[in-house]
Image: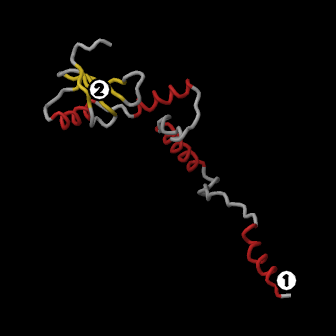
């Protein structure tokens, strides 16, 4: 009888663990459907937010297997997303080289991941996305 009671006690404790609780959906903000102005304002806000987002940021960071065409597009997208501006490149190169540098343009190097070609008045620099490491190439580089 003791074993029988012990068995029921164990089953009673284990049974709630195996119950299937359906997760609740996330709480959505309530919208007053009676006023049309509120809906128009909400629609405008949604379109502004969706148009301002970059398409590259919508791609999940961990994608395991991509076809080669999509892989190239993803690489181009990342390269263009991290492309430094002229002013940022000037500031970073000034800190790195410890001398005044005028940046003419910044281009993406084809075939590399987040490697940028920075044209300056001193020559051409190949830099990473943070512009903390750069290689100097002379002015007469053959491409």
Q: Residues within 10 Å of mark 2 (few under 14, many from 20)?
A: some
Q: Residue at x 79, y 83 (%)?
A: 6
Q: Quadrant of residue 16?
A: bottom right
Judged left or right of residue 61, residue 35 is right
- Identify the residue at the far left of this view: 99
Residue 5 at what x, y percent from top left?
A: 82, 85
Residue 60 at what x, y percent from top left?
A: 53, 41
Is 75 situated above or below 29?
A: above
Judged left or right of residue 17, residue 37 is left
Q: Quadrant of residue 90?
A: top left
User: Which residue carries the number 2 mark?
Assistant: 126
Q: Secondary structure at mark 2?
A: strand
Q: Residue at x 55, y 27 (%)?
A: 70
Quadrant in which the C terminus is drawn: top left
Judged left or right of residue 75, residue 39 is right
Judged left or right of residue 94, residue 27 is right
User: Which residue carries the number 1 mark?
Assistant: 4
Q: Residue at x 48, y 39 (%)?
A: 57
Question: Which is nearer the eye, 105 or 61?
Answer: 61
Is 61 situated above or below 7?
A: above
Residue 12 at what x, y percent from top left?
A: 77, 77
Quadrant in which the N terminus is drawn: bottom right
Q: Quadrant of residue 13?
A: bottom right
């Amino acid at each position: 009888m003791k074993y029988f009671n012990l068995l029921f006690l164990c089953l009673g404790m284990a049974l709630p663990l195996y119950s299937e609780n359906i997760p609740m959906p996330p709480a959505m903000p309530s919208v007053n459907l009676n006023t049309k102005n509120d809906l128009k304002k909400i629609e405008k806000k949604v379109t502004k937010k969706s148009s301002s987002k970059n398409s590259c940021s919508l791609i999940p960071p961990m994608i395991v297997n991509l076809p080669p065409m999509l892989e190239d597009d993803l690489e181009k997208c990342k390269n263009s997303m991290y492309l430094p501006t002229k002013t940022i490149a000037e500031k970073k190169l000034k800190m790195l080289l410890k001398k005044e540098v005028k940046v003419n343009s910044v281009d993406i190097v084809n075939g590399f991941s987040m490697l940028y070609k920075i044209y300056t008045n001193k020559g051409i620099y190949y830099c990473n996305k943070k512009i903390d490491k750069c290689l100097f190439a002379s002015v007469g580089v053959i491409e």
